[in-house]
Image (tube, rainbow, N blue to C red):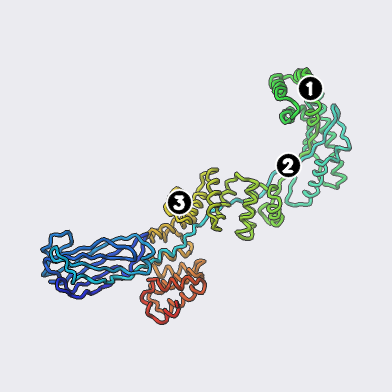
Amino acid sequence: MGFSVLLLASCDQLKDLTYATAPNPLELHGDSVAISVTVNIPPKGIKKKVSVEIAPTLGNAKLGTWKFQGEKVTGNGQTITFKPGGTVTFTDVVAYDPSMEHSELGFTGKVFKGVKEKTKEALPYTKLADATIITPLLVQTSFKPIFATNSIPEFTRDTVFAEINYLKGKSDVRAAELKDKDVVALMEWIKIAEADPRIKINSISVNGYASPEGEGVRNTNLSDDRSKSASKAFLELLKKAKSTLTVDNNGVKGMGEDFITFQRILQNSTTIKQEDKELINRILRDVKDADQREQKIKELGHVFNELEKEVFPGIRRAVISIDYTLTGYTKEGLNKEALLTKAHNNPSGLSAEELLWVSNNLASDNNAKLQLLNASLNVYPDDFALLNNVGAMALVQGDLTKAKTMLDKALNKKDDSKTKNNLAGVSMANGDRATAKKMLSQIKDKTPEVSYNNAIIMILEGKYASAISSCGSEGSFNKALAQVLNGNLSEASKTLAGSNDKESADGYYLKAIIAARSNAGVDAVVSNLKSAISKDKKYKEKAGKDREFIKFMNDATFTSAIN
């Protein structure tokens, strides 16, 4: 900011000393306050056998002793010759503590002639500079979180199906089968699909199957007959429903004996012993001829009876499958209200990707977003993106314990820069700048959020030019603050005017500092201070102590605004 020159009254051993302090007021940079005091000793200003010990103080801190001496003293102080006089400069860097904010740099001094202290000529307490400008601490320390995002695919390919079951060796469709729940549900779906322009039916297939008993050729023919009878019955249902759908003959196929389904039902059986399951599987694996395989299974006696009761009936069937594409999920056709309602009421009915999209795009505010994310995490507790976003939202809302718990889980699932950035934010909020800096340094992808968060640390470390660059082109309070601290006042005003803080309490207070530094006058300073104080009362007390406004402290206009 500037420097001061003070004159010390003469005494017998010393005379007409002057002191220059730079800067004045003292300034916080990084975590410390740098001090430079130059003592000017005029010609014949210090007797040849005199030495001086100066004991400076700043707030509650006592600094090291500063020493200078006449030319005939053999001590370790800086030597000043008697006739020409000279100057000595003392520098120090002091770790900042809050007692230095509303304080001053001053000293007392001892004068010695030889080894004898001249107590009557001791230097009285003298103020050297006001202390301390702590404007870097105005930095907004909340890190920008990074949320996992996604886009729901523009189309979804899926299949709906129903089964028609048959009696052993039969291929006729029983009327009761057409009233089963899966067939009724399929017909209801067809009704909805034909009325929904977003749904395109790609193909319909009717596949018949036989259980692996009986002759192989006969089962092949039986499965073919079942596909045809099921297709015929399905076409009659479509006609009755006045549907325009039809079944292409190429999609009607007999698939023969269904060993895949056989093995699946067998594996899920709770009545067939495990050793019998393993025996059956060995037969299926080792006996390639269908007729021999059937005979081997029949020879199992009671096991075959269990198969007949529990396994084979589920294989004797025809499956009606409809392959379709649902389009417009991210277009105008998306029923956002219905999707949001489903996410609230039945989140298990949506995929993790859908729930993530809903929380990011349809939540009305942060509370609603967190509610959706928590519900989604109950359904998908191991999903990385949901864990990261719950942690990020908890960080935004100040729940640091929950934020760290969720983010640690996310990082265990996936080594991801988003989560590391957010964990750095938790450390910063807990006052652990070192860990926050270390975590950010591990991120290779320097997204705008990561760069902005790095800029916060740079400001606190006194690296203002680097902070300006790291803030990027977007206007923000922190960028404007870094520009002020770097001496770019006009650029700071422009940045602040384009930021979200241009009319906030923080923004107006920074405008007052800019006005003070640019010598815009007390009226400009006070106008902005009044606006800041009207939005946040804490700035009234702060302005009264802030060394940014030291030159206005006795101005009536200024004092009336802060009292």
* In this view, 269 is above or below 518: above
Quadrant housing residue 265 = top right
> Residue at the bottom extreme?
556
Do the residues bearing badges 3 and 1 touch, measured as CB atoms within 8 Å? no
Q: What element carries label 2?
A: strand
Report the front residue among 280 and 498.
280
In the image, residue 461 lies at what x, y percent? 38, 58
Amino acid at the residue labelled 3: Leu
- Residue for badge 3: 440
Report the front residue among 288 and 421.
421
- Residue for badge 2: 159
Quadrant housing residue 481 = bottom left
In the image, residue 243 lies at what x, y percent? 83, 47
* Count of numbered tags: 3
Q: Earlier along the polypeptide chain: callout 2 or callout 1?
A: 2
Task: For marks 2 and 1, give the one nearer the viewer.
Answer: 1
Q: Which residue is drawn at 25% across and 65% down?
A: 55
Circle 1 crowding by C-alpha within 10 Å: few under 14, some 14–19, many from 20: some
Do the residues bearing badges 3 and 2 touch, measured as CB atoms within 8 Å? no
Task: For marks 3 and 2, give the one nearer the viewer.
Answer: 3
Q: Is residue 135 visible?
A: yes
In the image, residue 106 lies at what x, y percent? 28, 69
Amino acid at the residue labelled 2: Thr
Mark 3–mark 2 Cα distance, whole angstroms, equals: 45 Å
* In this view, 484 is above or below 259: below
* In this view, 382 is above or below 424: above
- Residue for badge 1: 304
Q: Earlier along the polypeptide chain: callout 3 or callout 1?
A: 1
Circle 3 crowding by C-alpha within 10 Å: few under 14, some 14–19, many from 20: many
Q: In the rendered view, does 340 fall on the left or right side of 140?
A: right
Q: Can residue 80 be seen in this view?
A: no
Q: In the rendered view, does 446 fall on the left or right side of 131?
A: right
